[in-house]
Image (cartoon, helix red, strand yellow):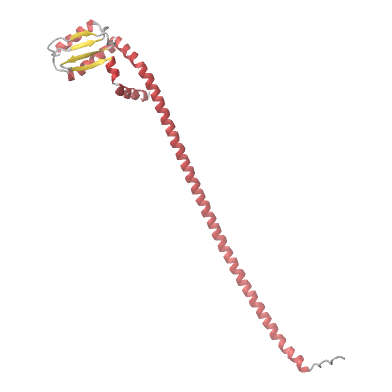
């Protein structure tokens, strides 16, 4: 058995017509507010994204500058280390070269001095230097001069005359010594001026320093 439907009165239709516009207005208001909020959220998101992008770009540039600075520092350090190694190698090479030249020069020095003693001009200069040192340090007494056996007697006599003319109280006593291969040695009052080949070579440290200066001097 069916239930009879309630008849629709004219008043109900009027109520529905009256409610519909406010509902639509409310919906429009809600939609408008939602759109406004969405726009605000979107704008905020865009602003935040832009800020983050600027920050990221700044951080990326900072990292690049830091990396570049670090790379430059590392390159500078590597260059400085390489230059230091090169300078050390050059210094060692120069020291080795100087040592080799010094050994060679020292080996040749005795023969060179022997040659100078055998040549009259250089022998005269050799004797003159020994006598200058003797005059500066020896007392004014007769000297005893030991010399290489090959020193010519004429040169000895000329030296004796020179000393007498300079005020020596007596002519020096000349004594050839087979142990002396070149040069002469002056004795007086317990003092000795050793101008022999062996005496000169005994001053090795000083001679090596002078040889190094000669070897390193620009040609």
Screen quadrant of the C terminus: top left
Q: Residue at x 71, y 85 (%)?
A: 21
- Residue 128 placement (x, y as % from top left): 23, 15
| Total numbered labels placed on residues in the image | 0
For residue 137, side relative to residue 31 (left or right): left
Query: Where, quadrant-wise, is the N terminus in this rendering?
Result: bottom right
Q: Quadrant for residue 3, please give it.
A: bottom right
Residue at image coords 61%, 71%: 41
- Residue 166 at x, y percent in the picture: 15, 13
Quadrant in the picture for residue 46 = bottom right
- In this rendering, is residue 48 above or below 198? below
Image coordinates of residue 163 in percent, x first then y, are 16, 12
Q: Is residue 165 left or right of residue 58?
A: left
Outermost residue, top direction?
A: 153
Give the residue displayed 41% in from the left and 30% down from the top. Answer: 92
Q: Residue furthest left?
A: 169
Query: Which residue in the rendered view is the most extreme toward the front?
Result: 1
Q: Position of residue 147 (x, y in %)?
A: 24, 10
Left or right? Give the position of 167 relative to 77. Answer: left
């Amino acid at each position: 058995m069916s239930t009879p439907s309630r008849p629709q009165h004219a008043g109900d239709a009027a109520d529905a017509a009256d409610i519909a516009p406010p509902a639509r207005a409310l919906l429009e208001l809600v939609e408008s507010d939602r759109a406004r909020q969405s726009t605000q959220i979107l704008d905020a998101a865009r602003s935040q994204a832009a800020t983050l992008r600027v920050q990221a770009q700044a951080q990326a540039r900072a990292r690049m500058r830091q990396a570049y600075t670090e790379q430059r520092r590392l390159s500078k350090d590597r260059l400085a280390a390489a230059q230091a190694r090169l300078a050390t190698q050059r210094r060692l090479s120069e020291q080795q070269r100087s040592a080799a030249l010094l050994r060679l020069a020292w080996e040749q020095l005795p023969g060179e001095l022997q040659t100078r003693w055998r040549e009259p001009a250089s022998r005269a200069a050799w004797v003159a230097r020994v006598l200058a040192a003797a005059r500066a340090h020896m007392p004014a007494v007769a000297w005893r001069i030991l010399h290489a056996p090959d020193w010519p007697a004429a040169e000895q006599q000329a030296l004796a005359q020179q000393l007498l003319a300079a005020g020596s109280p007596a002519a020096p006593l000349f004594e050839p010594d087979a142990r002396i291969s070149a040069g002469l040695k002056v004795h007086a009052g317990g003092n000795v001026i050793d101008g022999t080949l062996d005496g000169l070579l005994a001053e090795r440290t000083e001679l090596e320093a002078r040889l190094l200066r000669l070897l390193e001097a620009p040609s």
